[in-house]
Structure formats: C-alpha cells, structure tokens
Amino acid sequence: MRPTTITEVLNALDRIINTSIANNDPAGLFAFIYRRTTDQVQRAIAHKSFEDGLRMERFDVAFANLYLDAYENWRQGAPTAQCWATAFEGTHAPLAIIQHILLGMNAHINYDLAIAASSLMKGQPLLPLKSDFTKVNDILASLVNELQDRLSRVSPLFFLLDWLGKDQDESVINFSMSKARAFSWELSCELWRLEGAAYDARLQQADQVVHQLGAWVAQPPGWVLRNGLRLVQTFESPNVGDIIEALRR
C-alpha cells in the first residue's frame, strides 16, 4: 500500500535502502539522502516550523509517493518519466557517488515536486503553500555541508571536485536543492493553472528538460570534468552497503 504518513514514507525508504544494500544497487544512495531529508522535514513539522503542519505532511507524502511509484514502475518494467528513467539507468553505469545522488535529486525536485504541489492545491489558492514550500529550502541548505562532509568519507578524491569545479561543487549541490525548488515552484504555478491536454503537454515538456539536465549530470560536457569524475569514481568503494554505512556514521 502507498504510504499515507511520513513515518510510512520513512519505512518505505528503509525498504529501498535495505534492498539496494542486498543487491549492491546504487539506487540506494539517493534513497538514503532522501530519507535523511524526509526525516528532517518530519522533525520540523513536530517543532511547528511550518505554517500548516498537517498540510505539509500531506504534501510531503504526496511528493514521496511520486518517487516511490517511479522506483516501483522501473523495477517492474512499467513506463516512467524520462527524467526518472535517466536516473535509474544511471545505476547501471560507472558513475561517481555524487552523480547517483544528483540524478535522483534532479528528477525528484525538478519534476516530482511541481506535480505534488500543483496536485495538492488544485481547486484552491496555491499561494498559501509558498511559504512552507520555501521553508524546506532552509532544511535542504542545512544538509549541504553535512552531505559534503559525509561524501568526503566515502570518496577519497572528492576534494578534486573543488579544484575541477573551481570550488563550485557545493554550488552544484545547492543548485540541485534550492535553485531547483525555485524552478519547481514556477512549474507548479503553471501546472496548477492547466487542465487536460494542456497539462499533459506542459508536463511532457518539463520531463524533457529535466531529462536533459540528468543527461548532463551523467555525462558532463568538457573532457576535464568528465574524466575527473571518472577518476573520483575509480577510488570509491564499489560496495553500496559500505558506502551507506559510512554515510550513516
């Protein structure tokens, strides 16, 4: 059954993580980071950090179910959005840990988030959601430094991305988190106003854009960055369980 509470979402993510560890499937890397974020949202709701905690829980569950549905569809060979297909196909490629994480973040934040927000508020004003929508940025931003630190534990040459990207590796993560949410809010506003064929057409267009962003993450333009990421990946552990255990500590 699909989760109806954040606690059930966390349990579903735990199952994906455990399955990924058992199968040595890199899909568990994004699932682990997403679980960390979802746990922080649940804590923020408990501390009454949002204007409407009950609405935020419904929103967070709807958002999570889009990822859980995409994951299950992929496992069963059912159709899924192009952006998610790119992310899941990446789990079979020799990518760096950060690439696996960013592929999942790209599809979930740039695509799923707008669907969740526009669907939740359909038939009622969308603007009241914006404040709580934006507050999640603070949670995501607080996790950036933590993610940087944790990745350095499992990726010995991760520091090279500072040099290759001219100290912009954190900016890359911030784009995937905060700037992507800004993009997603604008897309939410568009989808909220649309119905029927117009909605489907805009969603398909968005999927194509996000898919192209994912393709860039998987195969960055430029010989230096692309080969730098290959070098970083070469020195990372190939064992998903070991990576997740190190990230947990």
Image: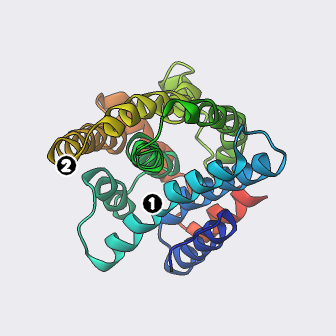
What residue is disc 1 on?
A: 67
Secondary element type, mark 2: helix
Secondary element type, mark 1: helix
Answer with left or right where residue 77 lies relative to residue 237. Answer: left
Answer with left or right where residue 207 lies relative to residue 164. Answer: left
- From what the image shows, is residue 77 above or below residue 183? below
- From what the image shows, is residue 50 above or below residue 64? above
Colour scheme = rainbow
Amino acid under label 2? Gly
Expressed as whole percent of the image width and height from the top left, the position of residue 13 reads: 59, 68
Amino acid under label 1? Tyr
Expressed as whole percent of the image width and height from the top left, the position of residue 57 reads: 64, 54
Q: Give the class, few, some or many, for how many residues have Cα within 10 Å of label 1's Cα (few <14, many ≥20).
A: many
| Among numbered discs 1 and 2, the one appearing first in the sequence | 1
Residue 74: image quadrant is bottom left
Q: Which mark is residue 244?
A: none
What residue is disc 2 on?
A: 196
Identity of the residue furthest to the front in this view:
123
Q: Nearer the viewer, residue 89 or 123?
A: 123
